Amino acid sequence: MATLRVSGQDLQPDEITVLLGAAPTYSQTKGEKRVFASGRERIPSLGSWHLSARTTEPEDLDAQVAELLAQLTPDLAVWHELSQRYRIDLFCGWFMGETNEGVAISCRTLLALGERGIELGIDLYSPTPEEGVRFGHDSAIMDCDR
């Protein structure tokens, strides 16, 4: 699972939609009450704009990043402006089928993320608890200098 997220105190989702050139799969405005299907209410402390890629099995982060970026502006000046004003990250949840798996991310994908000031965050989920194996998730974050 991969989701591009833009967030910030004064973020207005409609502005991000115009700048990036695509509608989000989810967005929220700071302070705007959200009511969920369960009836639970939440008032967000940040504005955010999310665009999710289709889930791939087996994992293919390169294809997911290409899918997301193909929908958005290629103008690096826009990305630079956004990365100066807001936090931008690509959140990835990797659900492993085995307790020891690996994945590779191409140089092209890493370059595309870096050029746009997009931080890469990865949550790894092991499949099931096994005797002697730690269960849960670990996070890895790759941050770029801005």
Image: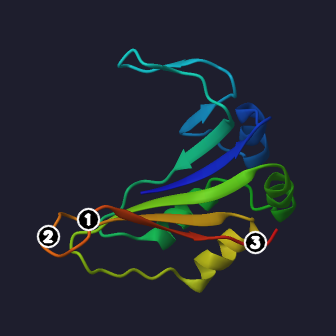
- How many numbered marks are there? 3
Residue 48 sits in quarter: top right
Type of amino acid at the residue the image marks with label 2: Glu
Q: Position of residue 6 (x, y in %)?
A: 68, 48
Closer to the camera in the image, 128 or 114: 128
Q: Residue 13, position in %: x, y?
A: 71, 34
User: Which residue matches tag 2?
Assistant: 130
Q: Which residue is mark 3?
A: 115
Vertically, is 69 above or below 107? above
Q: Are marks 1 and 2 in contact (CB under 8 Å)?
A: yes
Name which of mark 1 and mark 2 comes first in the sequence: 2
Q: Is residue 47 above or below residue 103?
A: above
* Residue 115 percent location from the top left of the image: 75, 72
Mark linked to residue 9: none
Q: Is residue 105 above or below residue 64?
A: below
SS at mark 2 in the image:
loop
- Choose top left, top right, bottom left or bottom right for residue 99: bottom left
Q: Earlier in the sequence, mark 3 or mark 1?
A: 3
Residue at the disc numbered 1: 135
Residue at the spot x=63%, y=60% of the render?
69
| Marks 1 and 2, how far apart at CA | 8 Å
Pick whichever, 8 or 70, lies toward us. Answer: 8
